[in-house]
Image (spheres, grey):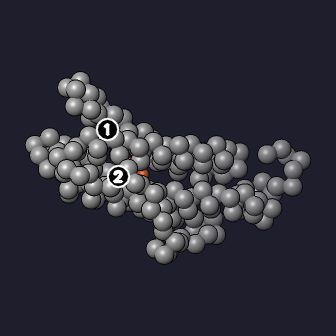
């Protein structure tokens, strides 16, 4: 933002003349909120369904992630409110994670691992978009999303490691 623009630097993203940016950002944050909520649903199911000795590590990881993803949803919700938005009700929800539906066989751990990697990749992509959008506009949202992005990068890396093990053994 150049200093000769109409922006009231004093109030940043909360300025009246940043209303349009704020509304675009609210859309991005609402999408992020729903992504986190759907991930919570998918990770709950996938932390309960899997069978077999090898499923235990995945189950425990997902159980930890559920808490983190729920925390992310709450952070996105709180930021929506701070930006004068309203956290949507459940009727606005529409599911997208076709790749994280229960597999045919509950011993199909590779399906779960790949689904998690896809979900985390989607989050990483969307959060990078928010970080780019907020550059020079809203350092508070940007800072929050950078922290969340790091969590998602960690989640993806962990599951990439799980997948590697299956690949080495010729199972994926
Ligand atoms: Fe998350
Ligand atoms: Fe995650």
x, y percentage for residue 93?
48, 68
Tell me the residue at 60%/48% (across/down). Answer: 130
Residue 135 vs residue 25, the one in the foreground = 25
Circle 1: is it few (<14), some (14-19), or many (20+) Cα within 10 Å?
many
| Residue ranking furthest to the right | 4
State how far apart marks 2 and 1 are (Cα). Answer: 14 Å
Quadrant that contains the C terminus: top left
The residue singled out by tag 2 in the image is 100
Q: Is residue 157 above or below residue 130?
A: above
| Residue ranking furthest to the top | 168
x, y percentage for residue 122?
48, 46
| Residue ranking furthest to the front | 104
Circle 2: is it few (<14), some (14-19), or many (20+) Cα within 10 Å?
many
Quadrant that contains the N terminus: top right
Q: Is residue 145 above or below residue 29?
A: above
Which of the 4 image quarters holds residue 38?
bottom left
Disc 1 C-beta below 8 A from ligand 2:
no
Secondary structure beneath label 2: helix
- The answer, for residue 55, to whether it is visible in the render is yes
x, y percentage for residue 47?
23, 54
Tell me the residue at 65%/57% (across/down). Answer: 25
The number of callouts visible is: 2
The residue singled out by tag 1 in the image is 159
Secondary structure beneath label 1: helix
Along the horizontal axis of the image, is 52 left or right of 157? left
x, y percentage for residue 164?
28, 28
């Amino acid at each position: 933002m150049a200093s000769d623009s109409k922006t009231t630097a004093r109030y940043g993203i909360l300025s009246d003349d940043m209303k349009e940016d704020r509304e675009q950002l609210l859309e991005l944050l609402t999408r992020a909120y729903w992504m986190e909520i759907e991930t919570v649903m998918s990770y709950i199911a996938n932390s309960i369904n899997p069978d077999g000795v090898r499923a235990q590590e995945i189950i425990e990881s997902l159980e930890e992630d559920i808490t983190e993803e729920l925390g992310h949803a709450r952070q996105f919700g709180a930021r929506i409110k701070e930006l004068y938005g309203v956290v949507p009700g459940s009727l606005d929800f529409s599911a997208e994670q076709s790749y994280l539906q229960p597999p045919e066989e509950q011993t199909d751990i590779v399906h779960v691992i790949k689904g998690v990697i896809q979900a985390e990749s989607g989050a990483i992509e969307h959060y990078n978009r928010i970080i780019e959008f907020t550059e020079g506009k809203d350092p508070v949202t940007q800072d929050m999303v950078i922290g969340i992005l790091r969590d998602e990068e960690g989640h993806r890396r962990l599951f990439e490691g799980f997948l590697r093990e299956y690949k080495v053994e010729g199972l994926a």
